[in-house]
Image (cartoon, helix red, strand yellow):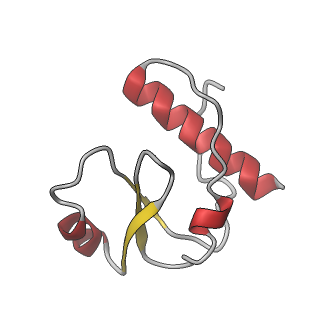
Amino acid sequence: MLITKVLELLIFFLDSLCNNKTMKPIDLTKALNPYKTGWVAINKSSKVVAWAKTFDAINKKVKEAKNIFIMPASKNYFGFITRSNA
């Protein structure tokens, strides 16, 4: 599935940027499926730990959390990655 591949590349790319190492792709399809609008926060275990309607609200929810990736929720993640070295 194309969305799955896009999400796998997203995680691979972000991890490479943050840790200067490679990792196996992670499928976030199931974790992100319930969220079509707003913003989500994802932890290192690839679980959505917070959702909010606005970027400011999600930042407040995860202010003290570490190793969290915040991204916009969408019905379709096609084109989300604009650059990848994978």
Of the 4 image quadrants, the one containing the C terminus is top right
* Residue at horizontal 43 percent and vertical 76 percent from the top: 38
User: Percent x, y for residue 16?
Assistant: 49, 26
* Residue at horizontal 40 percent and vertical 52 percent from the top: 43
Question: In the rendered image of this protein, does residue 11 appear above or below residue 38?
Answer: above
> In terms of depth relative to the viewer, which is nearer, 80 or 27?
27
* Residue at horizontal 58 percent and vertical 43 percent from the top: 10
User: Percent x, y for residue 3?
Assistant: 74, 57
Question: In the rendered image of this protein, does residue 73 appear above or below residue 80?
Answer: below
User: Percent x, y for residue 72?
Assistant: 46, 65
Residue 82 seen in render: no
- 82 displayed left or right of 40: right
* Residue at horizontal 47 percent and vertical 48 percent from the top: 45
Residue 86 seen in render: yes
- 63 displayed left or right of 50: left
| Quadrant housing residue 1 | bottom right
